[in-house]
Amino acid sequence: MFEVLIAHIKNKVDLSEVQEARLASFFISKKLRKKQYLLQEGDVCRHLSFVSKGLLKSFFSDEKGNEHINMFALEGWWISDFNSFINQEQAVLNITAVEETELLLISRDDYDTMMLQIPVMDRYFRILYQNSLVTKDYRLIVSSGYTAEEKYSQLAQNNPELIRRLPHNLIASYLGLAPETVSRIRKKLSLKK
């Protein structure tokens, strides 16, 4: 489980064997069953979570109870309600397992200690945060300026694993489309092949 995290870190920054060994002391492991909550709206997000295996979704519900998916997290991705984690305030997001999932969790205190004791981790997370901002900006452009088919095509091109592993209703929620629209687009694209 820890090997996935180490490989992810080493893909972004250099990590010595001593630093690698020290990292393990900051994390705890957790397993989730399908549909089990990692975080519920109103709770405080106590951990930043790294997905070693499985798939999670982050979402909020509107006043009518409709889910609006904020993001998915596959193997090698981090997930949290970041505002809640950093500020230790009530979460506005829910996080649940779409599949059976294995996680590595780090608490806020351990996160801060890790950053001080292993400075290269500060660089690692800075790279992740920069990439996250770029991705969120791009997602905003796609969601407001692209057609339904273009939104689906962009997701399929950039994250084919999500298209393969997710049911169309979750993809629809993430893209802000009706499930029928996603079914129609999938059918149309399969006929083109």
Image (cartoon, rainbow, N blue to C red):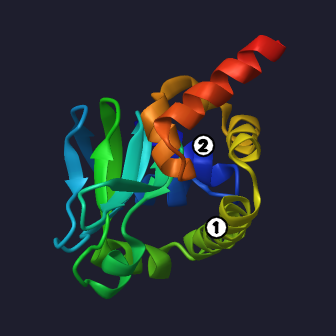
Q: Residues within 10 Å of mark 2 (few under 14, many from 20)?
A: few
Residues 99 and 142: in front is 142
Residue found farthest to the right:
192
Quarter holding the N terminus is top left
User: Are discs 1 and 2 less than 8 Å apart at CB?
Assistant: no
Q: Which amino acid lies under the numbered mark 2 shown in the image of this protein?
A: Ala
Marks 1 and 2, the one that precedes in the sequence: 2
Residue 162 at least partly seen: no
Image spot of residue 26 (x, y percent): 34, 62
- The quadrant of the image that shows the C terminus is top right
Q: Amino acid at mark 1?
A: Lys
76 to the left or right of 46: right
* Residue closest to the eye, 127 or 34: 34
Q: Which residue is mark 2?
A: 7
Indicate the secondary structure of the residue bearing disc 1: helix
Residue 160: image location, x then y, percent:
67, 31
Q: Which mark is residue 136?
A: 1
Question: What residue is rendered at 70% in x and 49% in y?
Answer: 11
Percent of width and height locating residue 139: 67, 61
Mark yes or no: residue 92 visible.
yes
Q: In the picture shown, does residue 137 fall above or below 38?
A: below
- Residue 185 location, quadrant: top right
Q: What residue lies at 19% left-to-right and 41% top-to-bottom? A: 36
Q: CA distance from mark 1 to mark 2?
A: 24 Å
- Left/right of residue 134 with respect to residue 101 in the rendered view: right
- Element carrying mark 2: helix
Q: Residue at x 40, y 57 (%)?
A: 68
* Residue displayed at 52% across by 57% down: 18
